Image (cartoon, rainbow, N blue to C red):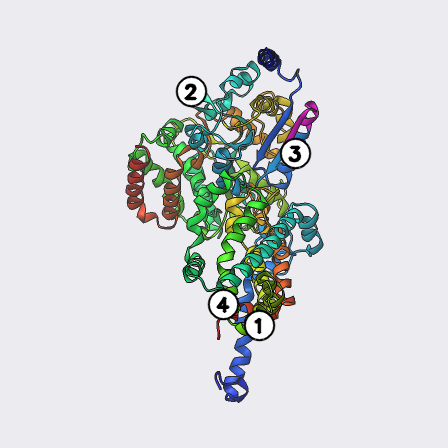
């Protein structure tokens, strides 16, 4: 009798809870919500903590515990905590970077959230990046543009203007080299910066679909299209376009060349703007242009790495976690966390407003209206980890010893055969 | 006498020695000097490429203020203390007792057990990474200070026991025999006769273990995550941000983290050197 009573009470509670779930936010959440963040930078960290505090205020009965882990350490620890001491919500990255955890069954399928009207309509642009096997495995909270940041004053001094074609790009570079500077600064010590160059050269030479086909392992590295990408790259290398000894610098250590005027531009993500401004470059000296078209027959496509929230499969409080994900992607929250004082990046929600910042506006404009080919994540997020690691090693080698190209491509082709079995 | 005192070398050799010594010393210390200088530089110096020049502005107060008041550093420091001190006491206490048993009593498997302690020292600890991680996980000790302390005690006891056993072996055995003749209980012999004589060894070992554990990075990263349990060595990396490494704050943090073992060394220098050489010469 007693156990029956218990069961009835339990099922009633359950019914109440699931009924509540349908009216998002209208009922009180309770229990613990453990959130793991990799936003360890002071500003993003404060942003996230403020956002979580707002969420906590809306749900006073929910006991929220936030852990912020250093971004790099997080990348190794995630394997650990998803299997062992699982939080309810965790930050991560879109596309192939989430694939290992999706395939290992460590991330929760959140397709139900994506079926909700608000999310389906407003986050459509990143749905592809969040989809594996036809299901969605997380939600995005921010992304940022890539492109060429350049010294406007140097361009003015040499009488150059923002290039839109490959011929103009090369002519500009020749003029910059003639003035005793390098066209591009880059620090390829940690390899990924070279991955950015490959992305853009390949997207412009062969197009988005070819690039993604390659990421999926369907294109040989020895293909003529790939060779054409490298041939274009070699033109810049041969004219002395890149700073010397770049293999010894991190991306940060390559910034001084730009600040001191020894290099005129930098193919980088929008996060380069903050340190460049801090180092004393004003908005009159610093500007941005979209990577110029190379092959006029392919549509322009961009890199815009997206950062995401996920629910680990082993989470204890998935109901509260789902509510948190809804909160994070809502238009107001996205506007707030991405503004200049906070993350200083682009909101993913189409209903959000972009902060009044020259570079953010240009980036938003570019991604929303001038990237018809598609939006890629980034080389090491689109390609499987093993392939990306080998390939980026190869890109660095190519930039230092362009004549090794055949060796490099043959090697990468072997890796492709192994990785995509 | 070997080595020949520099005073009795030829004048040429003396001059060469006196000029080369400071130069090599500075070269040797260059990384440390760099860290010290970096810790008072502003962030913009790194973006402007001013690595080796004079600091663009003097940011001592600012950088160290950030480290102490605007980061998890104090918490990491406290964790380090809470991990290092119990480990120090635990390992020294256990090994003093084990050393007493192995050094004083004659029983059949004495040597075998002793060799097992010694053999433990030859196991490269990296190969234990996965099993130990799984073990702490199963025991619910993953990501706790207790787990780290227990593991350190277990692992350090091998070396400490070797050290203690050899030290106790060198004590005059007649002292113990005399006590036994007087009818003193064995644990009293340990407590009142042997332990007071072991004080130099205890001090030396405590200092050594303190620096070993304080400087441990490997296990801190393997067995803990986050500021609630990680010691300072692992915590310094939290100054690395998503896109940028804050070299100035990392330098300031490293200096703060290095201070306790350095202080320990200078205060206990005598014991430290004794610890490294004790048992090395008969």
Callout in the foreground (4, 2): 4
Mark 2 lies on residue: A134
Q: Is mark 3 on a helix, strand or loop?
A: helix
Q: Does the magenta stretch include residue A60?
A: yes
Callout in the foreground (1, 4): 1
Q: Which mark is residue A49?
A: 3
Q: Percent x, y for residue A183?
A: 47, 46
Q: What stretch is highlighted in magenta?
A: A54-64
Q: Percent x, y for residue A310?
A: 52, 28
- Residue count near mark 2 (Cα–Cα under 10 Å), binned few <14, some 14–19, many ≥20: few
Mark 4 lies on residue: B166
Mark 2 to mark 3: distance in Å? 33 Å
- Residue count near mark 4 (Cα–Cα under 10 Å), binned few <14, some 14–19, many ≥20: some
- Judging depth in this view, the residue of B198 and A35 nearest the camera is B198
Mark 3 to mark 1: distance in Å? 68 Å
Q: Which chain carries label 1?
A: B
């Amino acid at each position: 009798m007693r156990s029956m009573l218990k069961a009835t009470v339990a099922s009633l509670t359950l019914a109440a809870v699931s009924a509540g779930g349908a009216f998002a936010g209208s009922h009180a959440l309770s229990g613990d919500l453990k959130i793991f963040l990799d936003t360890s930078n002071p500003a993003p960290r404060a942003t996230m903590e403020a956002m979580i505090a707002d969420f906590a205020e809306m749900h006073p009965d929910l006991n929220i515990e936030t852990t912020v882990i250093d971004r790099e350490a997080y990348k190794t620890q995630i394997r650990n905590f998803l299997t062992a001491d699982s939080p309810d919500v965790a930050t991560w990255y879109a596309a192939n970077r989430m694939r290992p955890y999706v395939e290992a069954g460590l991330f929760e399928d959140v397709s139900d959230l994506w079926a909700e009207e608000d999310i389906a309509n407003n986050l459509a642009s990143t749905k592809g990046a969040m989809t594996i096997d036809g299901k969605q495995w997380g939600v995005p909270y921010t992304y940022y543009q890539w492109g060429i940041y350049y010294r406007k004053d140097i361009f003015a001094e040499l009488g150059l203007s923002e290039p839109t074609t490959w011929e103009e790009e090369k002519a500009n570079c020749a003029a910059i080299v003639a003035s005793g500077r390098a066209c591009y600064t880059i620090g390829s010590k940690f390899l990924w910066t070279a991955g950015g160059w490959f992305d853009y050269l390949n997207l412009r030479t062969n197009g988005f679909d070819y690039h993604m086909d390659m990421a999926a392992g369907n294109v040989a590295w020895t293909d003529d299209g790939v060779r054409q990408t490298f041939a274009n790259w070699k033109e810049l290398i041969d004219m002395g376009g890149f700073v010397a000894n770049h293999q010894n610098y991190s991306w940060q250590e390559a910034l001084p060349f730009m600040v001191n005027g020894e290099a005129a531009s930098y193919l980088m993500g929008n996060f380069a703007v903050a340190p460049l401004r801090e180092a004393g470059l004003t908005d009159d000296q610093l500007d941005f242009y979209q990577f110029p078209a190379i092959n006029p027959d392919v549509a322009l496509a961009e890199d815009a790495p997206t950062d995401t929230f996920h629910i680990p499969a082993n989470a204890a409080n998935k109901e509260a976690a789902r509510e948190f994900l809804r909160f994070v992607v809502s238009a107001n929250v996205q506007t707030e966390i991405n503004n200049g004082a906070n993350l200083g990046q682009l909101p993913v929600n189409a209903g959000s407003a972009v902060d009044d910042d020259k570079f953010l506006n240009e980036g938003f404009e570019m991604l929303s209206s001038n990237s018809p080919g598609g939006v890629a994540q980034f080389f090491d997020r689109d390609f499987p980890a093993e392939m990306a690691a080998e390939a980026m090693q190869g890109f660095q080698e190519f930039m230092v010893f362009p004549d090794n190209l055949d060796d490099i491509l043959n090697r990468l082709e072997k890796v492709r055969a192994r990785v995509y079995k | 006498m070997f080595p020949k005192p520099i005073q009795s070398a030829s004048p040429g050799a003396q001059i060469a020695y006196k000029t080369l010594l400071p130069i090599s010393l500075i070269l040797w210390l260059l990384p440390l000097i760099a860290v010290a200088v970096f810790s008072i530089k502003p962030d913009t110096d790194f973006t402007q490429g001013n690595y080796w020049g004079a600091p663009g502005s003097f940011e001592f107060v600012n950088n160290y203020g950030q480290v102490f008041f605007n980061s998890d550093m104090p918490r990491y420091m406290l964790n380090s203390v809470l991990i290092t001190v119990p480990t120090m006491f635990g390992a020294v206490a256990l090994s003093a007792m084990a050393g007493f048993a192995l050094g004083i009593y004659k029983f059949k498997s004495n040597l075998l057990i002793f060799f097992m302690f010694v053999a433990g020292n030859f196991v490269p600890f990296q190969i234990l990474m996965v099993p130990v991680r799984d073990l702490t996980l199963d025991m619910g000790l993953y990501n706790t200070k207790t787990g780290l302390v227990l593991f350190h005690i277990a692992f350090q006891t091998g070396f400490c026991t070797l050290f203690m056993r050899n030290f106790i072996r060198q004590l005059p055995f007649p002292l113990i025999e005399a006590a036994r003749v007087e009818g003193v209980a064995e644990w009293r012999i340990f407590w009142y006769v042997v332990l007071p004589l072991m004080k130099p060894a205890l001090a030396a070992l405590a200092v050594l273990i303190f620096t070993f554990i304080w400087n441990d990075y490997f296990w801190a990263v393997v067995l803990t995550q986050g500021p609630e349990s990680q010691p300072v060595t692992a915590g310094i990396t939290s100054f690395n941000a998503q896109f940028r490494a804050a070299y100035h704050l990392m330098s300031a943090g490293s200096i703060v983290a290095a201070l306790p073992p350095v202080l320990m060394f200078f205060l206990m220098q005598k014991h430290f050197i004794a610890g490294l050489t004790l048992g090395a010469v008969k």
